[in-house]
Image (cartoon, rainbow, N blue to C red):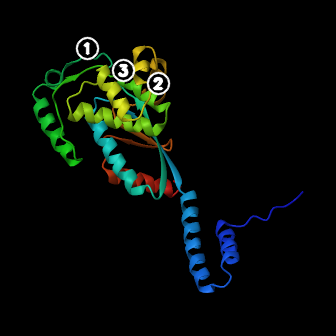
Amino acid sequence: MRTLNRRSPSSRWVSLLRAAAPDHPRNLQNISRSVKIMAESADNNAGKKLVRIDISSDTVCPWCCVGKKNLDKAIATAKDQFDFELKWHPFFLNPSAPKEGVNKKEYYLKKFGSRSESMEARMHEVFRGIGLEYNMSGLTGNTVDSHRLIYYAGTQGLEKQHKLVEELFIGYFTQGRYIGDREFLVEAAAKAGVDGAAEFLDNPNNGLQEVNEELEQYSSNISGVPHFVINGKHRLSGGQPPEVFLRAFEVIASGK
């Protein structure tokens, strides 16, 4: 059997450079040093740990929006240390919510009574903390179509799915868009780069089985959202600040 002599990327580059510049030892030394730094950087990137995060969420849950923005901030801080794979899963805060939608303010007043006013004030404060203006105008209602669309986006790539969730949150929580409105859903999908959303949503059965399967697999044993499962074992609930996510990443880095 023939044995191949495998050399590191840096040694191969240095050999080529030496052949190309035999009369310039000082330049070669400087170039070799640069090549070594690039090779070490490539080795570090190759050695980054993969962090997989499964997120159970509902598209009308304000704390889910807050949790996403804080998670995004933590990921931006830790992206040089880790690679990330995020996947969104459905949860229904109100499975019997009407398809046609109801006035958002009236719905919360009916559900929470006198507490609704203080809750709204609190959400305004929290959203300002993540750089957004909370908007209670518009309708709320059934979220099944948004979850079907999130599933569909995931079939085109998890990055597109993540972008779609962002667009849905921004539209619903800051612009008064209705989460059950087909036009809004298609518009959000287009902004996220998701192809064929209108045709997919036209058939109410598309993605419905998959949504129910994910609901059973990921969300049947939890009582609230957002809920994050990191690398299959580390669990976090609620709109946690970025520091909490960063500590969880550190635990993963330590191999615990």
How far across and how far down the image is residue 220, in percent? 43, 26
Q: Which residue position holds label 3?
A: 144
Tell me which numbered mark, 2 or 1, is placed earlier along the sequence. Answer: 1
- What is the three-letter code of the residue carrying label 1? Glu
Q: Secondary structure at mark 1?
A: loop
Disc 2 and disc 3: Cα gap in Å? 14 Å
Image point (65%, 79%), residue name:
21
Disc 3 secondary structure class = helix
**Position above or below: 52 against 28:** above
Q: Residues within 10 Å of mark 3 (few under 14, many from 20)?
A: many
Give the image location of residue 67, x and y in percent: 32, 42
Residue 216, label in figure: 2
Give the camera-side residue of 186 and 142: 186
Name the residue: 41% across, 24% down. 197
Tell me the number on the disc at residue 100.
1
Position of residue 38 measured from the top left corner of the image (x, y, whole percent): 55, 68
**Residue at the far right in the pictured view:** 1
Task: From the viewer's side, name the closer residue of 127 and 45.
Answer: 45
Residue at image x 50%, y 41%? Answer: 232
Nearer to me, 28 or 208: 28
Q: Identify the image quadrant of the N terminus.
A: bottom right
Q: CA distance from mark 2 to mark 1?
A: 25 Å
The vertical placement of 45 against 138, above or below, is below
